[in-house]
Every structure is written in C-alpha cells, then in structure tokens.
Image (cartoon, rainbow, N blue to C red):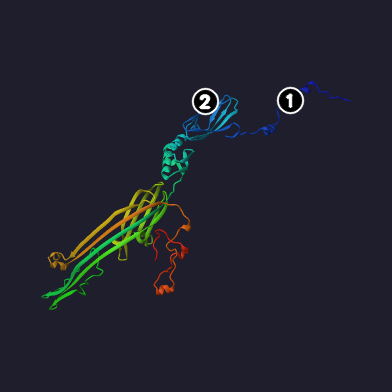
C-alpha cells in the first residue's frame, strides 16, 4: 500500500488557493446579494404630521443628538437648530412640506409631514362676538378659506364673507357655502294703473275759386293741412273738390269753400297685476304685451335683418331678504305702447312704429306685506299749430278763411303699487284657479238664453269648493 505525501511548498500553495476562494467569492454571487431600500416620506414608525400656524413656530425636542436636518421647501418652513436636540420650525408661507432628522451615523430619527395654515382662532372669535346667532365653520385650503354652517339671514352671510375676505386680504379667496335659515322666497304683487286722456280739435277752411280778368284766368286753391293730429277722421266738412260745403258763382266765376271741423276726446285705461316669485338675490321678469319687428340692417345677400323689440307692461325685480322683517327690493317697471310719434318710414314700403314709454326704477326696503306706491308719474303735452296762406291768414275776420287750426292735448298719469311677501310652498290641493267649476253652456242655453257658461247653485259643481280671495277675472 502506497501513500501520497505533499511536500512543504505544495502544501503552502494549496492552502493559499483555498483561502483566496473563501475570501473573494465570484462577482455573480456579489451582484445577487445587492438590493435598494427606499423610505417614503410619511411612512414608518418615525413619521409624524404637524400643523404650524402661518408666521408662527413650533419646537422639536429630540431624545438623541441630530447631526443633519433636511427641509424640503425652505420657502414654506425654516428650521433653526439651537442645540443638537432642539430645533425651531417657523411657518413662513401657507403650503405643505416635510423635514427629516438624522443622527451622526445617518440613521433617521424623525420624519415630519408639515402643513402651514392660517391661524383661524382670531376669525372664529370675531364670528362669536359679532355674529352670535350664526353657526359658522371655517376651514382652510392652502391660502383659501371655506365657510360652512348656518346664518340667520342674507345680511349675516354677506358680513361673514366680508370679514373672512378682510382676514385673508383677498375676498376672492373666500368660498361662501353658508346656508341661510330664514325664508328666502319672495312674492312680489304689483298693480300698474295708467290713465291716458287725449283731446284733439281741428278747424279749417279750404277754398277753390275760378275767375278771369280780361284774357287771364285764375284758379287759386287753398289746402291747409293739420300737422299735429293728422288728417281728420270725421266731423263736419269734405274736401273742397269735387264736393263742397258752400259755393258762390256769377257769370262763370265761382268760389267753392269747404269747412273742416273735428273734435276727438279719448280715454285709455291700462291695468296690469303681475305677480312674481323669486328667491333672495335672484331676478325675475314679467312682460304682458308683445314684440314688433325692427329692421336692423342687411345680411351678406342683401336681405333685411329683423330684430324684435318688446312693448307692453314689463316688470323686473331682485329681492334680497335682509331678515324676517326686512326685504330689499330693486324694482324696474315699464309701460310702453306703439305710437306713430317718432315712427320711421322706409321708402314707402314699411313703417317702423315708435314707442311711448313710461319707466320707473328704484331700490327700496319693505317689510313682508308692506306696500309702496310709486306715484306722481304725470305727463301733460299740449301741441297747437296754425297753418294757412302767408299774410292773408293774419287778416282780421277774413283771415279765418285762409287758415286751419290743429290742437292736441295728451295727459298721462301712472301709479304703481308694490307689495312683497315672504312665501312658502303649499300643496296643490290648497290651490284654486279662476276656471274652477266652469262648464260651457249647452246648445239650448246658448241659443235661447244667450248664456256663455252653465250656471248652478252655490255649492254645486267643482266638488263644492269655492274660490277665496282675489283670484282673477271670472265670467259671471
């Protein structure tokens, strides 16, 4: 049996190779052992969240010494290190940032998520002092404020928003989401009454003559217009030719005369009672009338473009409920009619009428159920013209045969009564309309009795229901 023995050098070489293999493993093995660790902000047992009031500071006390402090955004939060264990954090601007604290060996000591907000304590104290009946919650979103809660009326809501706007220095940075507890629906009852009185008087003489002097024949004719009220619609007299009121003739010479006399008295009564309902701060509009076309130009193809203008009785109002006993109203009302005054004639093809307008606009404060009268809207217009032959019309006595007189007087009086009410919705069963119980007349009643609708005793028809209060116009 033989044995294999290593000499001394061989043993030393073998030992060094084995030691190298143990100390320096292959590169592939080292790569397999490498990995990356990421610590997200706000996670882990070292994370904390704090809120710092704007322009104020907090003190951070550490249990061990800190060697390194990192603030992500120094424009929002500034860190002042007084000792290795004590740091001051000052809120410089509204916003969000974070800060990290490390010890001398690089280990993380603290992870702070920082929110810098405005200190709302003074504003809340101001609300409690000035608006004791309001329940307002103030929340901050970056550099903006959000107001939530309940206030007794719209005035308190405006005051709360104004205070918050002055607190942040910018009213646009305040979002008002306050709810108003008071009733906000306002019904406006309006009564518009207009009386128009007019008087027109016309008196004139037109002459037509024919005579000769030697071999020269003369045929003078006078036709005096009525320039104020226009041509007469009736009255006494006809045009001088071919008809006449009187005639004188002698030896073929003649003188025809036509007397034109006319007088007209007019009375127009306009009554409108519109009722509108709107919530506080919103507008409502009403128009009882119509629209008339007005040519405004031509299009690219040469066709006339038409725009319609409204006329009639119009009402617009904007209510603001100040509190249960006060309502601020911005009212504008208008009564307009089509008129020949100011009308525009276009090439004998079309006439665009003018408008006579009576308009009132005001802002008042009334209690619910209180009334306001807008009166004194008076207008008195007098026009008088004399047309005739120059010089001759000024001749005493005989001048009346060569002139015409046109006189017109218009008087208008407008009265508007406004009454606001705070209203609540009601059930449909509690409402009634003017046509409740209306039944058309049958052929027998219509033919022999001249009735437009059927009649019945009180309590019959319409399920026995009766109308209460002013409900409108009813055919009786």
Quarter of the view holding residue 255:
bottom left
Q: Position of residue 185 (x, y in %)?
A: 43, 51
Which residue is under mark 1? Answer: 19
In the rendered image of this protein, does residue 68 appear above or below residue 342? above
| Disc 2 residue crowd, few under 14, some 14–19, many 20+, Cα 10 Å | some
Seen at 30% across and 54% down, the residue is 375
In the rendered image of this protein, does residue 214 appear above or below residue 54? below
Q: Are marks 2 and 1 in contact (CB under 8 Å)?
A: no
Under circle 2, the secondary element is strand
Tell me if I can see residue 58 in this picture: yes
Q: Is residue 204 left or right of residue 415?
A: left
Under circle 1, the secondary element is helix
Which residue is under mark 2? Answer: 81
| Viewer-closest of 22 and 192 | 192
Residue that extends furthest to the bottom in the rendered view of this protein: 251
In the rendered image of this protein, does residue 190 appear above or below residue 37? below
Residue that extends furthest to the top in the rendered view of this protein: 8
**Image quadrant where one finds the N terminus:** top right
Q: Position of residue 80 (x, y in %)?
A: 50, 26
Q: Is residue 168 left or right of residue 111?
A: left
Tell me if I can see residue 344 in this picture: no
Name the disc covering residue 312, or none. none
Q: Earlier in the sequence, mark 2 or mark 1?
A: 1
Quarter of the view holding residue 232:
bottom left
| Disc 1 residue crowd, few under 14, some 14–19, many 20+, Cα 10 Å | few
């Amino acid at each position: 049996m033989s044995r294999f023995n290593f000499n001394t050098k061989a043993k030393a070489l073998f030992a060094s190779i084995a030691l190298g293999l143990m100390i320096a493993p292959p590169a592939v093995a080292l790569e397999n052992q490498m990995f990356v660790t990421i610590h997200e902000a706000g996670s882990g047992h070292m994370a904390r969240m704090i809120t710092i009031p704007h322009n104020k500071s907090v003190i951070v006390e550490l249990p061990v010494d800190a060697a390194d402090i990192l603030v992500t955004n120094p424009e929002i939060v500034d860190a002042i290190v007084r000792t290795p264990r004590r740091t001051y954090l000052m809120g410089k601007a509204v916003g969000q940032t974070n800060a990290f604290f490390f010890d001398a060996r690089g280990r993380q000591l603290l992870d702070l998520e920082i929110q810098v907000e405005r200190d709302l304590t003074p504003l809340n104290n101001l609300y409690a002092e000035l608006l004791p009946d309001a329940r307002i919650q103030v929340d901050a979103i970056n550099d903006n404020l959000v107001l939530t809660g309940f206030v007794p009326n719209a005035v308190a809501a405006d005051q709360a928003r104004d205070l918050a706007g002055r607190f942040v220095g910018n009213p646009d940075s305040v979002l008002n989401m306050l709810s108003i507890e008071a009733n906000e629906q306002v019904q406006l009852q309006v009564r518009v009454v207009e009386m128009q009185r007019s008087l027109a008087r016309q008196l004139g003489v037109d002459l037509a003559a024919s005579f000769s002097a030697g071999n020269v024949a003369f045929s003078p004719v006078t036709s005096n217009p009525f320039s104020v009220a226009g041509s007469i619609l009736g009255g006494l007299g006809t045009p001088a030719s071919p008809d006449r009121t009187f005639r004188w003739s002698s030896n073929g010479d003649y003188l025809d005369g036509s007397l034109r006399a006319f007088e007209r008295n007019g009375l127009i009564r306009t009554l409108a009672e519109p009722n509108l309902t709107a919530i506080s701060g919103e507008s409502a509009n009403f128009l009882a009338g119509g629209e008339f076309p007005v040519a405004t130009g031509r299009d690219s193809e040469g066709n006339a473009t038409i725009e319609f203008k409204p006329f009639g009785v119009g009402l617009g109002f904007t209510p603001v409920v100040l509190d249960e006993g006060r309502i601020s109203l911005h009212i504008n009302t208008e009564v307009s009619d089509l008129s020949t005054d100011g009308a525009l004639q276009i090439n004998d093809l079309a006439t665009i009428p003018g408008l006579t307008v009576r308009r009132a606009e005001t802002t008042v404060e009334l209690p619910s159920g209180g009334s306001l009268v807008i009166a004194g809207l008076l207008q008195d217009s007098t026009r008088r013209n004399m047309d005739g032959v120059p010089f001759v019309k000024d001749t005493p006595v005989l001048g009346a045969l060569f002139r015409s007189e046109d006189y017109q007087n218009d008087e208008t009086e407008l009265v508007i009564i406004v009454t606001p009410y705070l209203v609540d919705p009601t059930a449909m069963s509690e409402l009634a309309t003017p046509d409740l119980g209306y039944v058309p007349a049958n052929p027998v009643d219509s033919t022999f009795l001249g009735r437009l609708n059927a009649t019945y005793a009180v309590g019959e028809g319409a399920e026995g229901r009766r109308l209460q209060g002013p409900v409108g116009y009813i055919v009786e």
